[in-house]
Image: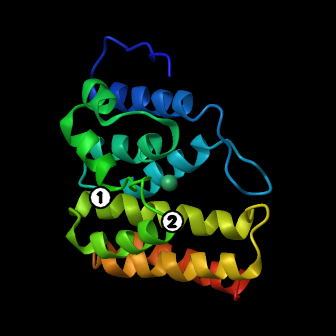
Amino acid sequence: MSPVPTSPARSPLARLAHAAHFAARAHKDQQRKGIDAEPYVNHCLEVCELVLIAAEPGDVEVAIAALLHDTVEDVGVTRADLVAEFGERVAELVMHVTDDKTLCKHDRKRLQIEHAPHLPRDARLIKISDKTSNLRALVRTPPVGWGPERLADYVVWAAAVVEACGPTDAVLEALFREAHAEATRAHPG
Ligand code: ZN
């Protein structure tokens, strides 16, 4: 992707805005799988909003990582790009929630459950927020071409990943449970 111009201002809010701009540019050609085909960056913004419910006050880097959480997996941004633009901790967090695309889908899904308990709390916050956003989308605008079984499988799997994350934040967990309950009602299998 062509470089995103960097603002000379480097306050936490300026860094956050830069990350939002970076994510929007990185995902500019991508849409969500749902029938509404929403711009992909809507999901990144929602995940960031959710993460900020549970992040330590003033921890802008976890919010930045939430905005960027799908850039390595989906659009070819590299770890080195993230280090250069946003620093080591943001890159590390994004890599914690990035699947290894050399593996088959089945293994990637299994490994998300296996790895979840070993992730730092910040990465688990991103993971729970990601699954909450995805389950909400499954209800609001289900993916084109997904049959009842695939939809129900995703709902069950998302709950298994969040369960494996263990305790994190009561409010975030409650929002996940709400999204999960609605998705289960919408897609019982
Ligand atoms: Zn995501």
Residue occupied by mark 1 = 123
Q: How is the image coloured?
A: rainbow
Which residue is located at x 59 percent, y 69 percent? 135
- The answer to whether the residue labelled 2 contacts the one labelled 1, judged by CB atoms less than 8 Å apart, is no
Q: Quadrant of the C terminus?
A: bottom right
Report the front residue among 22 and 80.
80
Residue 94: image location, x then y, percent: 33, 47
Looking at the rendered structure, the kind of residue marked 1 is: Ala
Quick check: can you spot residue 79? yes
Residue 88: quarter of image: top left
At a point 67% along the width and 76% down the height, the residue shown is 150
Horizontal placement of 161 versus 32: left or right?
Answer: left
Say if residue 177 shows up in the picture. no
Label 2 or label 1, whichever lies nearer to me, is 2
> Which element type, helix, strand or loop, lies under badge 1?
helix
Badge 1 crowding class, 10 Å Cα cut-off, few under 14, some 14 to 19, many 20 or more, is many
Which badge, 2 or 1, comes first in the chain's sequence? 2
**In terms of image quadrants, where is residue 54?**
bottom left
Foreground of the two, 8 or 82: 82
Horizontal and vertical percent position of residue 155: 58, 78
Please tell me how crowded label 2 is: few (under 14), some (14-19), or many (20+) other residues with Cα within 10 Å. few
On residue 105, the disc is: 2
Q: CA distance from mark 2 to mark 1?
A: 21 Å
Left or right of 86 in this view: 110? right
The reply, left or right, for residue 70 in relation to residue 184 is: left
Circle number at residue 145: none
Query: Horizontal and vertical percent for residue 93?
Result: 27, 49
What residue appears at the point 52 percent right and 31 percent down from the top-left corner? 26
- Residue 27 drawn above or below residue 184: above
